[in-house]
Amino acid sequence: MTGHTWLWTPPRATPASVGVGQLLRAYRQAHGLTQQQLADRLGFDQSYVSKVESGRRAIHDISTLRHIARNLSLSPEDVGLAPGAMADRRRDSAPRSPAAEQVAASQRTWRLTRDHLNHHRISLARAAVRLYPETDRLGSGLLARPGWVWDRPVDIDDVALAWRDDVEPPMIRGDEPETAGSRPLLGGGSPQNRYQRYTRAMRDLDRPTLFENRLSFRLLDIGGDGTAAASAGNRPALDFGHTTYFDAVDVCETVAHEAAAAMAGSGLSWPALPFRARIGDPFDFGRRVALPSINTLTIRHDRGGTASFFLHRRSAGSVATAGGVYHVIPAGVFQPSGITSVHHAADFDLWHNIARELSEELLGNPEHDGSSSSPIDYEADEPFQSFEQARRAGSMRVSYFGVGVDALTLFGEILTVVVIDADAFDKMFGGMVQSNTEGSVVTVGPGRLVTEGIPFTHTALRRLVDTEPIAPSAAACLELAWRHRETLLPGLRARMAS
């Protein structure tokens, strides 16, 4: 947890966190603990415990409430969760056979490791990146091959997407013997019967609010050398095939879980990471499923010379991956809004995916989750029609930076930016929501309008990247936008660099 208070997220309509501060204070007093001792028991910073106890910090993540209840042996009701939220706890109190106790212990250990993963994703990513050669690193938590990130922003329409139907199944699936330590015992029959998939364990033991297996676009290859102008004939090229969301999570969250367990034990080193070693080359997208997320830094640009950007605090209790961190908004897995060929034709497009995420995460519109039989008409349906008009008018500009790989999870990360002139932004996003199904929009203090954003300055950027739990892909988007600010934000005042 961070000890800084300059960023603020509004309360979300999630299970009650009211009273948790008083509960922690009462627990400390009853057990004779200092705030530091309680923080150590929970794996939190002492300053975070202090803020929760005083009411200056609310807890909104379901997984954090579960973490507190489990580590302090409290009931789910004590921390504001429904009685069934930790039903296994009631079973734990009943007498068990040795085999049943072995299963329960395995599942407890799995949940504690997953709690540790969700509370330390940033530090784990920064440690994981150091496992790879320095030439393969992009920032403090991403990996990339030379040429994957371009030396200038490229218009999103100049990124060439190609489709492959004849794709070999991945060799790595997440059920290899090396993953046994990340898959808890299931029970029933043999005491060595384990969950076959990480996603099945998540479903039963730590299910996020948003957890559906959707058709997605699998990244297969990356072309272009990252140096020549797209207009000169060398432009970014990305090849794709089909996959599903759970196919990627079964590999990516398993390898992250393994890292969390290693870090909590002997430390992050290759001998402690057999599954990561089995995967091998993180850039070999034929060997494993590489499902990319499209991460878009949204910047509001005032032609008077100022700019601001927007961040999202993702809820670990709501999302399956990248929970509990600051992220750019919007960000979402590259996938169609439906399963028909018509959906595929319309949605196999980076910009259309970004537009859907802008609609969902900034405006709070219902998620286009793949369940609708009606495709989106991007030229006629709102708010997409307004987005298209703004792009044609030049007041909304979408650019591609390149691709990286998250060092912790090995998820693919497509890095993009959308710059919107202030008047167009205020017209299209004047009704911007404070929170959505995935988390809350961040401001620089309570009482500030979410549409103000965070000032786009070097000071704010460095403070975020150096001191806050910001997703590696979000940090990369910010760093790249600052590097190319003269291209992206003409007229940005010199004082903005302070």
Image: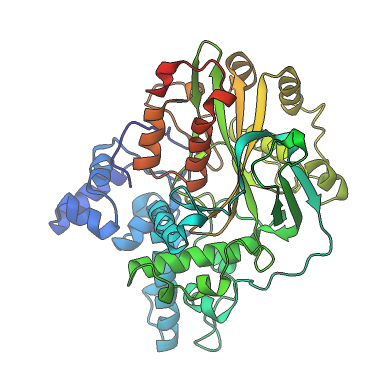
Q: Residue at x 72, y 54 (%)?
A: 216
Q: Is residue 264 visible?
A: yes
Q: Residue furthest right?
A: 342
| Left or right: 119 as drawn, with respect to 189 | left
Quick one: 269 or 422, which is closer to the camera? 269
Image quadrant where one finds the C terminus: top left
Quick one: 440 or 328, which is closer to the camera? 328
Q: Where's residue 283, x and y in %?
A: 61, 61
Q: Residue at x 52, y 45 (%)?
A: 473
Give the image's coloring scheme: rainbow
Q: Where's residue 373, x and y in %?
A: 83, 45
Number of numbered discs: 0
Does 297 appear above or below 253? above
Does 303 appear above or below 51? above
| Left or right: 453 as drawn, with respect to 153 | left
Which picture quadrant has residue 244?
bottom right
Q: Is residue 186 visible?
A: no
Q: Residue at x 28, y 37 (%)?
A: 55
Quick one: 414 or 201, which is closer to the camera? 414
Does 95 appear above or below 13? below
| Left or right: 439 as drawn, with respect to 394 | left
Q: Where's residue 105, x and y in %?
A: 39, 77
Q: Where's residue 318, x and y in %?
A: 52, 49
